[in-house]
Amino acid sequence: MNVLALEFPPVNHLFDWPSVLFNDTPFALNKVGLTYLFAMVMTMLIFGFAGAKRSRLVPAGVQHVAESGVNFVEESVVMQTIGPDGRKFMPFLTTMFFFILFSNITEVIPFWQFPANSRMAMPITLALLVWVIYNFQGVKHQGPLGYLKNSLFPPGVPVFLYVIVTPIEFVSTFIVRPFSLAIRLWANMVAGHLLLVTFAILSATMWSSGGLGYVGALALSFPMLILMTGFEILVSFLQAFIFTILAAVYIGGSMHPEH
Amino acid sequence: MLNILAETGPGEMLEGLKAIGAGLGYGLAAIGPGIGIGTVVGNAISAMARQPESAGMVRTTMFLGIAFTEALALIGFVVFILLLP
């Protein structure tokens, strides 16, 4: 049995893709770019169809997906974190939710099987966009000085503790937030992809080694692969949800400061 | 043991130590968040069981708590990826 001589490719091979379209131009596309295009087109199609067709009172088909998506974001993201006046962020948050969901879910689509968000580019771009929006909203709703005062000097803290609290608040609010937002999405997708790759390679190696390997592949690694695929569907949904809800929390926090 | 150590070059030794460090680092980084997420979810479940009508709000807050707790484990995972040879 050759199971122990498992050959795992170097990590870079799993995440680096050569460009396939428009080579040697600034618009070169690889699998990551194609996945983002797919996610963008799917998001646009869902809401385009829901809006273009005459909407029915009892939704069906695509309209149903769009309406329940909007409803979900409104009920469990916006109303819970920002409140009724956060409704103007509904389009942004809903679009972001669906875009992240579709670029994550390619992780489990057969023959595609690559989560585009396991490359840092798009998570950090979205996170910096959220950073710009919540700082802008904070300045708009509290004024520049009020925003700085409320975020750097949280009320209800003994005065001498501000020596410690203010630097921590500065670092965590203005520097760490976008990075932790991006790293959360990115690292979850990298971990999921590595997990699926590990079990897929394990199954293939066991199966090709024959003998006891058939038993091992059928009894252990292949069921785990199926289980992990189900788990990754959950994770890609959950990460889109968490990214959206944290964006809403940050925006809500700078719109309504603690008193 | 000493023979094995004598046969390996300094580069190999470094690679091996890196791999051990990466594995141990991720394992250690996962302990705290594991306990933390358990506490968060457990308390959220008991809150939901006591007051099912506030389940929606508790669930949202629970996911927030999970996200913040999980960040520590993910930083450990990033270190693991960076240290891999």
Image (cartoon, coloured by chain):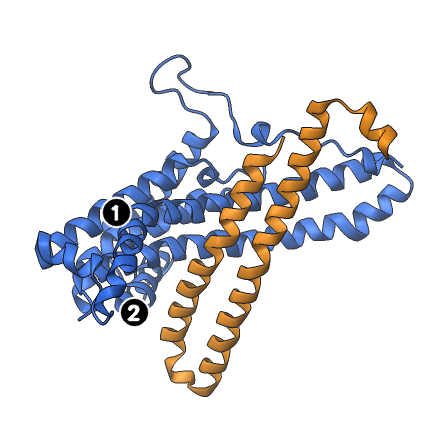
Q: Chain of mark 2?
A: A
Q: Is residue A41 left or right of residue A190?
A: left
Q: From this viewpoint, which residue is outermost toward the front? A: A160
Left or right, residue A2 beside residue B82 = right
Task: Decide which of B29, A180 is in the foreground and name it.
Answer: B29
Q: Residue at x 71, y 33 (%)?
A: B16
- Left or right placement of residue B26 versus residue B12 in this view: left
As drawn, the residue found furthest toward the bottom would be: B50
With respect to residue A134, does B80 lie above or below?
above
Residue identified by numbered label 1 = A131
In which image quadrant can residue B6 be found?
top right
Q: Is residue A41 above or below residue B53?
A: above
Q: Who's blue, chain-wise?
A: A
Does the rendering let one see residue B50?
Answer: yes
Which SS class for mark 1? helix
Which chain does the residue under circle 1 lie in? A
Give the residue number, with chain letter if any, for mark 2: A80
